Image (cartoon, helix red, strand yellow):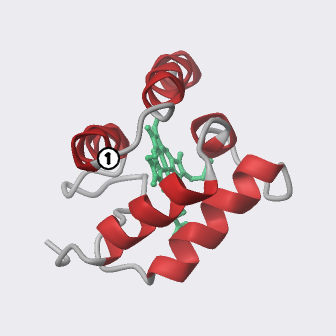
Amino acid sequence: MIKVLAAGLAAGVLASSALAGETQLSYLAATCAACHGPAGGAIPGLADRPADKIAEALTAWRDGTRPGDIMPAVAAGLDDATIRALADHFAGEARP
Ligand code: HEC
């Protein structure tokens, strides 16, 4: 069930990552937050994580060198600039 949800969300990420920019970034970041919400739970939140760690993880998932259930599909469509922008975005957020 969560895989079906992930596929839908990942498709949205894929479609939107073709465009760059501030509006696009906040849209993308909201997609991430749908799973990594501040409410916590099974999926870790992203706020206040070091940008380099976030970028490293996303790059490895995109390149297929890091295993995961969900994130490989999410990261598949992200280019380097978008990964960097997302990493900086989440690293800059205060922990809730
Ligand atoms: C459909 C739910 C979902 C969406 C959407 C999602 N993630 Fe994830 N994320 C996960 C899950 C589940 C994990 C645990 C690893 C796995 O199973 O793939 C994870 C792990 C991570 C981790 C590693 C956290 C850690 O410290 O272990 C990072 C970083 C991350 N996601 C970033 C993002 C970013 C950035 C986005 C938006 C582009 C995003 N995620 C969108 C579900 C999601």
Position of 18 relative to 87 (above/below) = above
The residue identified by callout 1 is 21
Image mark count: 1
Left or right of residue 41: residue 70: right
- The residue at 52%/70% (across/down) is 54
- The residue at 20%/77% (across/down) is 95
Residue 16, quarter of the rendered image: top left
Residue 93 locus on image (x, y percent) = 21, 73
The front one of 6 and 51 is: 51
Position of 84 relative to 61 (above/below) = below
Q: Few, some or many C-alpha atoms within 10 Å of disc 1 (few <14, some 14-19, many ≥20)?
A: few
Quadrant in which the C terminus appears: bottom left
The front one of 83 and 32 is: 83
Query: What type is the residue that disc 1 sits on?
Result: Gly
Left or right of residue 68: residue 52: left
- The residue at 41%/59% (across/down) is 86
Residue 12 locus on image (x, y percent) = 44, 22
Position of 56 relative to 13 (above/below) = below
Residue 50, quarter of the rendered image: bottom left
